[in-house]
Amino acid sequence: MSLSKPYLDVPGTVIFDADQSRKGYWLNQFCMSLMQPANRERFKADPRKVLDEWPMSEEQKEAVLAADLNRCIRLGGNIYFLAKLGATHGKSFQQMAGSMTGMTEQEYRDMMVAGGRSVEGNRYTGEDGSAQPQNQPQGHGSGKLL
């Protein structure tokens, strides 16, 4: 029996909870393997071959191959593990965050220096008493690193 998850209606947000952790276990373990230089080199040389060594879903493998961070997160990826994938592609965390929000690195940096995103449209759906839609978009940008 699943616990009540009132946080599921935060627009554009995937909360990394126990269910997401279970779903993304092998995806996250793969990302952690990229901390080893030899594993990074193997992955860069033949990404599909390396991914096929891991018991991830095909959808997870495709998201990694596309370097689609938003999709990886929806499939159980944790951003702190996915940072290893970004670094393997030569991307900083700031570049990764920008790609996930549909902003350039500079736009993302400027937004954060200015205090972050406005809360308008980023609160719980229905917190003003309105009905809560069942299907929220999951992220604002493409989330692709490449």
Image: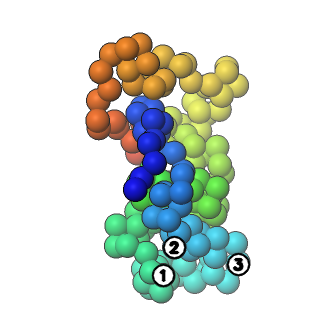
Q: Circle 3 is placed at which residue position?
A: 37
Tag 3: amino acid: Pro
Mark 3 crowd level (few <14, some 14–19, many ≥20, 10 Å Cα):
few
> Could you say which is closer to the camera, residue 112 or residue 20?
20
Q: Secondary structure at mark 2?
A: helix
Tag 1: amino acid: Trp
Q: Residue at x 39, y 42 (%)?
A: 138
Q: Indicate which disc residue 54 carries.
A: 1
18 left or right of 109 in image = left
**Which image quarter: residue 94?**
top right
Q: Secondary structure at mark 1?
A: loop
Q: Nearer the viewer, mark 3 or mark 1?
A: 1
Calculate the distance from the C-alpha at mark 1 to the C-alpha at mark 2.
7 Å
Q: Circle 2 is placed at which residue position?
A: 26
Tag 2: amino acid: Trp
Calculate the distance from the C-alpha at mark 3 to the C-alpha at mark 1.
18 Å
Q: Residue furthest top?
A: 128
Q: Is residue 15 above or below residue 117?
A: below
Residue 139 percent across, percent down from the top left: 42, 40
Q: Residue at x 70, y 25 (%)?
A: 113
- Whether pointer 1 and pointer 2 mark residues with C-beta atoms closer than 8 Å, the reply is yes
